Every structure is written in C-alpha cells, then in structure tokens.
Image (cartoon, helix red, strand yellow):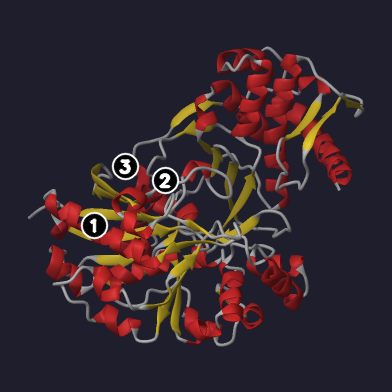
Amino acid sequence: MAAPCYLGWDFSTQKKHLVHYVGSLPLKLKVIAVDEKLRVIHEDNVNFDKDLPEFGTQGGVSVHKDRLTVTSPVLMWVKALDLILEKMKSSGFNFSRVKALSGAGQQHGSVYWKQGANSVLQNLSPDLPLHQSLQSCFSVNNSPIWMDSSTTAECSSLEKAVGGAQRLADITGSRAYERFTGNQIAKIYSLNPEAYSQTERISLVSSFAASLFLGAYAPIDYSDGSGMNLLEIYEKAWSPACLDACAPGLGKKLGHPVPSHEILGSISPYYIQRFGFNPNCKVVAFTGDNPAILVMVAYISLGTSDTLFLWIKQPKPALEGHIFCSPIDTEAYMALLCYKNGSMMREKIRDEIASGSWEEFSKALVSTTVGNEGNVGFYFDVLEIIPNAEGIHRFNKHNERVTTFPKEVEIRALIEGQFMAKWIHAEKLGYKILPTTRILATGGASHNKAILQVLSDVFSAPVYTIDTANSACLGSAYRAIHGLVAETSVSLTDVVKLAPGPKLVATPTAGVAQVYQSLLKRYMDLEEQVLKRSK
C-alpha cells in the first residue's frame, strides 16, 4: 500500500511576502503534497493569466473602469482547479495516497452561489470538468476581492449602525474596511437586489474552494470569518447587528461558522470517480491565506509593504490594525498590522544616500550605535496606514525638528523608526513579548542581516528566516494533518516538529532593551506630533 500524503491548496491572488494592499500579484493556483515526514513530494500550479487567457485577467483580477472596483471571475478559479488536477493526473500523481487536504483562499473575497447550486455540487458528473457542471451556479459571476475599495458608503453605514468605528472593532476585531466582506455584500444587496435574492449561500473564497472538494456548501471558518466585519470574535458567532446592517436574511446565507481545524467530511464522490481519490480522504476546513502561514510565532513580512502578524491571547481591538481569530487555537487571536512604506522606502533612502548599494547601506547602519544617540525619524514616501501621515520628519535628541541627518544617522533612523512603529502599535493591540517569542522574517529585506539585527534588538527577540515561496500551501498541508488529530488535543506545533526548521539569523544585543525602553516612549510621543502636523 502506498504511503499516505496530504495536500495543501492556495487559492489566493497575492504574494505572501508582499501581503495586502501593496505589491505585485502572482498569477497562480498552487498545490503542494507532503508525506508523513512533512517532506514536499509534489508541487504544481496553474497560471491564471497564461493558462486561462479567455478570462482576460491581469494578475488573476479585473480592475473596473472606476479603478475602485476589483473582481475575479469565479469560473476562472473553478477551471484552474480542473487544469491543475488534470496536470497532476497526467504526471502520474497517485491520488489514492491522499489522506486529507486543506487549503487557503485570499482573505475577504466572496462567492455567491445561486439557488439550487448545492444540489449540483452533490451530483457532479465525473464525465465532465467542474467548470462545465458549475457554470450556471453563481448569482454573481465576478467576485469582489481584497483589492476592491468601492464600498466607502457601506463602511460608514455599518459603523453608524453599531455605534461607531471603535464599537465595530470591539465586536469584529476591525473597524469597517472597504475590502471586508460584509461591506461588499451590502453593496451587492444595494445595487443588485435581484442577484442577492437569488443567492442561496455566500462563501468566502476559502470556503468556496472547500465546497468544491466537499461536494456541498462548506462552512466559513472562524479565522477567515473574522475578516468580514460580521463575526463576533469572542463569541465565534455572527453579530446580529452587523448582519442586519448589511443585508436582510444574511445569517442564513452565510451558514454557521466552524473552528479552523474542523473536519468537514469526506471528499466528494466526483474526485473518487474522476481522479481516484481515496473515499476516506478528509476535507479539513479551509482558511484565509494570511492565517494559513502562521505557526504560533510572530511573523514579519519585509516586502514592498511591511506586514506584521502576531499571536495574542488577550487582544485589544483598535481603530488601527486588525484582530482575527486564530486558525489553530480557538482560545487565541492573531493581529495584523500593515505598513505601505516598507522596502520601497528603504530602497529610496539606499538609492539617495548609499549609491544604490545594500552593502554600503548596511555598513552605514552597523557603524552607528543602538538608539542612534537619540535621533529619531519618520519616513513616509506615500500616505501611511499606521499612522495616517506622510512626509519625512526628523527629530534630534532634544525633540527638535531638523531638516537633515548625516548619512549614517539617516539610515539608522529609518530602520529603527520602522521597527519601533511596529512594536508600539503591536503593543496597543495587546501583544506581549514572551521568553519563548520567535520572529520569522520574510521578504526582500529579510536577506539583510544588518536590518534584521535592528529588528531583533527593538523586539528583544531572536529573528529567524524561512523560505515562504509556498507558505500558504505548506501551512494548509500541515493543517490537513492537524485536522485529523486536533480533537485528540494534539497541537499544530506538535504536528510540525518534523518540518524543516527556520534559520536563526539574529539575537538581541546585550543591554539594548534598556536603550529602547525609553526611546520607544519618545517615539510614541513624537508620532503624535507627526500625526497632528499631517492633519
């Protein structure tokens, strides 16, 4: 008998190390198979633009004329799954080995199943590809996705309905955001009530993908569901006030959310008959692409934009940043903070004062002392998210504004400032550094040891690097394994012990914690000045 394996799927349209709002898009549906020792034994992908040109997408998405509305064709995802499964079959992949599968979908995106679609899912013909059977199953053919920013009016209405932005954050983990699913649903109900009334079930991209494998509507998991402005993150249930503010009868169309490690059932007979899957193959709940990459660590993505993911036991929802339910621990939460001025700002300073050389940039950085002798800088080439400010602001050790810094001071002010900002706002959301804290760094700047040393010093934690080219796929494969044993109190941490470990690249310099303790307080006060000036 062939040894078991596990599949992890990635239905997202964004690079994990450039996560959210800024960055280039990959163009692929991806899958990874791992064996019981967590070794990758198969990888495959389908390129949305190149392999499915009939959908006319760029980066797997369609940007509409108003430049605010951004969608993806639902059937493109379905047809991509057809293609990738046929590729695997042609390559000789043995589907009968697959013991369980799970996956990730881009956060916030939504899919609208037409009345009767569940019956079609339950009775798929193994003689037809999925896209042919499902082509008439959607009441909205183009799904709103995470890049959409056309729902400002709906966001305002939702916040007003529940008592304000902070109140909405207290309930759902975030104030109202244009890309969040509840606001997208409200827009569809407002502009196309007929399509809404014809909708039998609304899925997130993650639960939609799970539905394809399950052969029935799959429930939304807690973690991805908490990126909708609809889920009460502490109660793990839909908020009646939020539902009512978005559209009538919405709770019924969403179904009941479930834990992220839930086994949803066995794989649809369609896959058994068409591809030879084992009838006992289990489908574990799919989740969002951001939650799928986490394994109980602090995770920082130093790409075009900088994104910070954190595990929190006692969250403090705020108007800035997001709190989501943990995808692997129903008693924990994850925070997400995103900064537009990441590597783009670092590269700009490198080009302006370090001759475009990272080597020269790094030499200048390590030549300066921790704390930069009290000099502090804020560097926002574009309007920043946290804080909502722009421009370059420099302060000397006396808190006096200055117009320039020497080269070495400028570089350290930039790097220290970027990481101090992340620490301050993480702490506001309830994050606490523990003796066991590890930071995983990815993205372009994670190759620069001098930058990572500053990160380690500011956060007083060791920094590791890890290859995340297919992190959502790998995370999903690990979650598939975890789903089979989660009810026996085995943690995901236990499951991934055999996985290739991250590489330690920096540890905190002795004595620096005291330097940053006072500097962080100053940075927070100066940020308030910068914010007031920007307004």
Q: CA distance from mark 3 to mark 2?
A: 29 Å
Residue that badge 3 annotates? 498
3 and 1 marks in contact (CB < 8 Å)? no
Give amino acid for label 2. Pro
When asked about the image quadrant of residue 353, the answer is top right
Give coordinates of residue 241: x percent, y percent. 67, 81
213, 352: nearer the viewer: 352
Q: Earlier in the sequence, mark 3 or mark 2?
A: 2
Give amino acid for label 3. Leu
Query: With respect to residue 20, does 420 lie above or below?
Result: above
Give amino acid for label 1. Leu
20, 395: nearer the viewer: 20
Quadrant housing the N terminus: bottom left
For image coordinates 69% across by 69% down, the residue present is 155
When asked about the image quadrant of residue 188, the answer is bottom right
Q: Secondary structure at mark 2?
A: loop
For image coordinates 57% across by 27% down, the residue present is 452
Residue that badge 2 annotates? 26
Mark 3 or 1, closer to the camera: 1
Count neighbours of disc 2 (C-alpha within 10 A) and say few if under 14, some if 14 to 19, many if 20 or more: some
Residue that badge 1 annotates? 83
Q: Secondary structure at mark 3?
A: helix
